[in-house]
Amino acid sequence: MSSAAAIALLALALSAQAEFSAQEKARLLAHGPWPPAPQRDATNRVSGKPAAIALGERLFYEPRLSGTGSLLCASCHEPFRHFQDARPRAFGLAETERNTPSLLNVALYRRYGWDGAHDSLWSQSIRPLLEPREMRATPAQVAALIRTHYPVDYQRAFGASVPADDEQVLGDVGKALAAFQETLLSGRTPFDEFRDALEHGDALAAARYPPAAQRGAALFVGKALCSGCHAGPHFTKSENHGGFRVPGLRNVALTAPYMHDGSLATLEDVMRRHGGAQLSSRERDELVAFLRSLTETLQLQ
Ligand code: HEC
Ligand code: HEC
């Protein structure tokens, strides 16, 4: 290609780009950088500790943690399905009324569960163990499993032998599970490349981001007011609205169906029923293009 043709193509690519106001640009930059700096949970004494992460990972795949010996965390939070189950509502030992959320980036929330009822990842991790429709275990059973099968792993993770108090062991199982889940972060996305290109004033790199996604991004931080709730690098303020905690949106295109009860099958449905009422159908499509650009690049290949 001649350099004149290359320059003409570049000019064309740049003119197809959405124009962002200084305010929109600042808001887009606030959705990064990604990945975030590692954070420790001050309420979990083994947060970030390699031996606890290793124990938590083993327990995540341990069916004997359930009352029937047949269910594991990964039965619903399936690693090859982005740590969810693709069902509208979770089914453990019985059906529940809630959709299984992905566990990717779960460390970045401050409240847990669809209704934000738990304020730590480790307390949220105990809930499914005791819930009769999920794993139906008891503190005594969980503690006995650790004493019999994991005494060495426990010692390494917590620096002490397994305590006599069953409730304390249950809490520590939650803490090891949480330490493992804190390591589950999603990868970089086309949006992250675009966001960093905006930050560095690299118009050529920014132009690689599809025009529909660019217009969707402008809507997301502007007229459609999405970023008022879906804020920051994880696309959530982690606060409740209308009774539910605002969910993060990274990899959201991979985790259908949607909402607390799994009632909406596609992102198009979500845009018709949630937040997009004042928008044209073209604008809703642009928002969907933007949401799809929050998918980690490895999963797009
Ligand atoms: C029967 C399916 C099922 C099993 C088994 C299960 N979960 Fe869940 N998980 C769910 C559902 C459903 C929710 C949403 C619960 C709610 O909001 O009330 C959830 C929510 C969570 C959350 C909160 C995520 C967020 O975005 O706030 C965490 C953390 C979690 N589970 C971890 C675990 C761990 C650890 C285990 C194993 C000890 C486990 N889960 C076992 C279905 C399951
Ligand atoms: C007032 C706060 C608020 C605003 C504004 C908002 N959302 Fe949400 N969003 C939520 C809450 C809360 C939920 C979960 C609701 C539920 O489960 O019933 C949610 C759920 C979603 C989901 C489904 C996520 C999942 O994993 O199931 C998507 C996608 C979404 N929002 C995108 C958007 C977009 C795009 C906009 C702008 C058009 C927007 N939201 C505006 C609070 C908000």
Image (cartoon, rainbow, N blue to C red):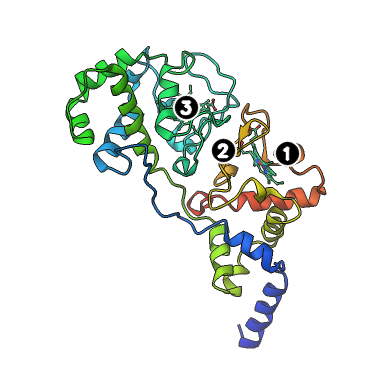
* Residue at 58% from the left image edge and 63% from the top image edge: 194
Under mark 1, the amino acid is: His
Q: Which SS class for mark 2?
A: loop
* Residue at 79% from the left image edge and 51% from the top image edge: 282
Q: Which label is found at residue 274?
A: 1
Instruction: Using a 10 Å C-alpha cutoff, classify the residue at mark 3 as few (fewer than 14 neighbours), some (14 to 19) or many (20 or more).
Output: many
Instruction: Using a 10 Å C-alpha cutoff, classify the residue at mark 1 as few (fewer than 14 neighbours), some (14 to 19) or many (20 or more).
Output: few
In x, y percent, where is residue 2? 62, 86
Say if 186 sits above or below 32 in the image.
above
- Cβ of disc 3 within 8 Å of ligand 1? yes
Under mark 2, the amino acid is: Thr
Figure quadrant of the N terminus: bottom right
Q: Check if mark 2's residue and mark 1's residue have beta carbons within 8 Å.
A: no
Q: Which residue is mark 2?
A: 255
Q: Is residue 132 visible?
A: yes
Under mark 3, the amino acid is: Cys
Dot 1 or dot 3, earlier in sequence? 3
Q: CA distance from mark 1 to mark 3?
A: 26 Å
Q: CA distance from mark 2 to mark 3?
A: 13 Å
Left of 213 or right of it: where is 72?
Answer: left
Dot 2 or dot 3, earlier in sequence? 3
- Place residue 267 in its image quadrant: top right
Q: Which SS class for mark 3?
A: helix
In x, y percent, where is residue 121? 43, 34
In x, y percent, where is residue 138? 36, 13
Q: Nearer the viewer, mark 1 or mark 3?
A: 1
* Residue at 61% from the left image edge and 29% from the top image edge: 260
Q: Nearer the viewer, residue 48 or 163?
A: 163
Q: Which label is found at residue 36?
A: none
Q: Which SS class for mark 1?
A: loop
Q: Which residue is mark 3?
A: 76
- Cβ of disc 2 within 8 Å of ligand 2? yes
